[in-house]
Every structure is written in C-alpha cells, then in structure tokens.
Image (spheres, helix red, strand yellow):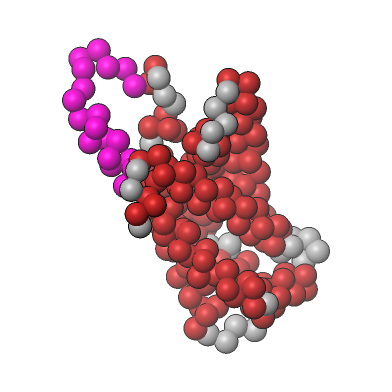
Amino acid sequence: MSILKTTVAKKVALALAGLFLVLFLFVHLAINLTLIYPGKEAFEEAVHFMDTNPLIQLMQPVLFLVFAFHIYMGTYLELTNQTKRSVKYVKNNPSANSTWVSRNMIWTGLMILGFLLIHLYNYFLPFKTQEIHDHYELVTGLFHNAIYVIIYVLAFIALGLHLSHGFQSAFQTLGVNREKWNRILVIIGNIVSFIIAFGFSFIAIYFYFK
C-alpha cells in the first residue's frame, strides 16, 4: 500500500494494530474469567453470543488480518533496523540505551506467534470444524495437561514482556513523547502487561489444580 511507503507510516500502523490487539486481549480475558466466575453457564452464553452475533463474526477476519499485519510489520521493521545497525562500533553498549525487552521484541513476538498457532489448533479449529456441545469442557480440559499449562503460562509471560515495552512505545510513535507522559505510559504499560499476563496465567493454573 502506497500509504505505508515511509518508515514513520509503517510504525504508526504497527502501533495502531498493537493497541487494537490490546483491546481484544482485555475482551478475551474478561470472557475467559467467566470460566471461573460466574462459571460454565455464563461462559457458554458468551460463546453462543460470539458465535451468533453478526458483528462479532465480521470482526473475526478483521482480527486475523490485524494479527497477521502486526506480526509481518513488526518483523519487517525489526529486521530493517538490524540491517541499519549492521556497522557496530567496538565501544557499542546497547544495554546502556535500551532495555532487554526492547532489544528482544522480535523473540517474544515469535514465542507469542508459536503459542497462537497451538491455541488455534487446540481450540479455534475444533470450534469451527466440529460440532462442540461443551465449550467449557473443551477449554478447561486443556488446562488439565501440565505441559500445555507450562507452555500457556510461558507464552503469556512473553506476551507480558512484549506489552510492557510495546504499549508505551505505541503511544510514543503516535506522538505522546513528552518526558512526563513517557513515565506515566511506562507505568500504565506495566500495569496492562501484568493484568493480561497474570489474568490468563491464573485461569490456566486455577483449572490445573482444581
């Protein structure tokens, strides 16, 4: 697309896609928490609503495209930046100017992508191709597998790390880059990343030990 020819435009598009996905994650977490409270009936009603609501059905391909775009553009920009930094100086000390998380966004992103493929295979694919009568059991049953729970928790730790930098970086890209706001965005980003990483992980661990 011609509108994305410049690096700045690509970064803005990446930031907007990332913030959209954060919103999706909060909605997804809220629905998943109904697994614990109020419980099975509420979760089944939520699934039925999402499966029959035309707007939700329309948003599913949009969400998929946003995910794909975010993954592609994030990888593209990271590889482009690495190419530009190919000439390194002897006294170069990247840790003095950036955090570990910011330097490893592509790796946490790839970990998230790997888990996303597993999640699609274990839940979304059966949901779309099979006649599932008990979605609650389909989801909670996965959490009885220790290996799956470990992978699940590690993936959301990676997601939390990814968000802790990505959230404030997105707003800085969109022009919120004053020193005062940067500090606030770092705090908000850490809170957002903790809620999402802890929330999803807690659900998995809860049902494993239940």
Identify the image quadrant of the C terminus.
bottom right
Q: Residue 96: x, y in percent?
A: 39, 17
Percent coordinates x, y for residue 109 in the rendering = 42, 47
Instruction: Provide residue 175's location: percent of width, then percent of height.
Output: 54, 33
Question: Which of the 4 quarters of the picture holds residue 139?
Answer: bottom right
Q: Is 41 positioned to the left or the right of 186 in the image?
A: right
| Residue at position x 60%, y 57% in the image | 24
- Seen from this angle, which residue lies furthest top? 91
Q: Residue at x 55, y 70 (%)?
A: 60
Q: Quadrant of residue 177?
A: top right
Quarter of the picture containing the N terminus is bottom left
Is 60 or 30 nearer to us in this picture?
60
Residue at screen point 39% across, 46% down: 10
* Residue 210 in view of the camera: no
Vertical placement of residue 31 versus 12, above or below: below
Residue 14 seen anywhere in this rendered image of the structure: yes
Residue at horizontal 38%, vertical 32%?
Answer: 103
Query: Going by the picture, which residue comes out furthest to the right?
Result: 38
Q: How many marks?
A: 0
- Spot occupied by residue 8 in the image (x, y as percentages of width and height): 40, 39
The span shown in magenta is 76-94
Would you place residue 81 above or below residue 22 in this image?
Answer: above
Residue closest to the far bottom: 131
Q: Is residue 82 magenta?
A: yes
Q: Nearer the viewer, residue 138 or 57?
A: 57
Q: Is 129 left or right of 34, judged from the image as shown? A: left
Residue 179 belongs to the span the image colors magenta: no
